[in-house]
Image: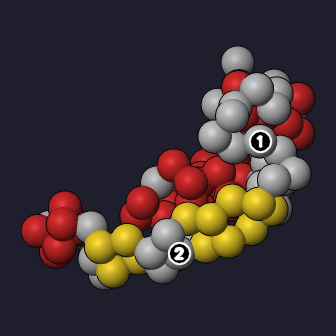
C-alpha cells in the first residue's frame, strides 16, 4: 500500500488511467453465502489514490457493491476518523491510521 500512495507502483501510478476489466468470479459463483453476483463490472478511472479506487483494485468482491467500502468507512468513523469514499490514502496515512 505504501508503494502506491508514495507513487512508487508501476502497476498503479498516480494520475494515470486505470482500466479494470469485467470479471466472472468462479469463487463467488461457488459460494452463494457471499451474497454477491459472480459477474463483476469493470471500471475505468484516472487513479488518484482515492479509497474507493484502491478498494476496487484490490478486492474483487468490492466491485459488486459498496458493502466493503462502507465497512471500511464505518470502522474509521467508529475510531474517530471522518473519511469518505473519496478520501485519499495519503490523507488517511497522515491521520496516523496506518504505518
Quadrant location, the N terminus: top right
Please tell me how crowded label 2 is: few (under 14), some (14-19), or many (20+) other residues with Cα within 10 Å: few
* SS for callout 2: loop
In the image, residue 14 lies at what x, y percent?
Answer: 83, 45
* Residue at (48, 79) in percent of width and height: 41
How far, Cα to Cα, is label 2 from label 1? 19 Å
Q: How is the image coloured?
A: secondary structure
Q: Is residue 29 above or below residue 84?
A: below
Residue underneath mark 1: 13
Please report the residue visible at 46 percent of the width from the left and 54 percent of the height from the top: 59
Q: Position of residue 15 (x, y in %)?
A: 87, 51
Residue at 63 percent across and 40 percent down: it is 11
Q: Which mark is residue 59?
A: none
Q: Residues within 10 Å of mark 1 (few under 14, many from 20)?
A: some
Does 25 sit left or right of 50 as displayed? Answer: left
- Is residue 3 rendered to the left or right of residue 28? right
Residue at x-position 51% and y-position 49%: 58
Q: Nearer the viewer, residue 64 or 16?
A: 16
Mark 2 or 1, nearer chain start: 1
Q: Secondary structure at mark 1?
A: loop
Q: Is residue 89 visible?
A: no
Q: Are marks 2 and 1 in contact (CB under 8 Å)?
A: no
Whether residue 66 is visible here, answered yes or no, is yes
Q: Position of residue 87 (x, y in %)?
A: 83, 54
Residue 42: assigned label: 2
The furthest residue to the left: 30
Q: In the image shown, does 7 or 36 lie closer to the viewer?
A: 7
Nearer the observer, 4 or 90: 4
In this image, 23 relative to 73: left or right?
Answer: left
Residue 88 percent across, percent down from the top left: 84, 48
**Quarter in which the C terminus is drawn:** top right
Amino acid at each position: 500500500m505504501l508503494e502506491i500512495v508514495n507513487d512508487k507502483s508501476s502497476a498503479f501510478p498516480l494520475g494515470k488511467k486505470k482500466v479494470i476489466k469485467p470479471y466472472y468470479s468462479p469463487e463467488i459463483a461457488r459460494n452463494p453465502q457471499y451474497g454477491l453476483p459472480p459477474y463483476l463490472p469493470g471500471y475505468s478511472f484516472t487513479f488518484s489514490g482515492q479509497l474507493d479506487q484502491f478498494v476496487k483494485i484490490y478486492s474483487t468482491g468490492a466491485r459488486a457493491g459498496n458493502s466493503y467500502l462502507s465497512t471500511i468507512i464505518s470502522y474509521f468513523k467508529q475510531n474517530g476518523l471522518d473519511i469518505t469514499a473519496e478520501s485519499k490514502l495519503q490523507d488517511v496515512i497522515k491521520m496516523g491510521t496506518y504505518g
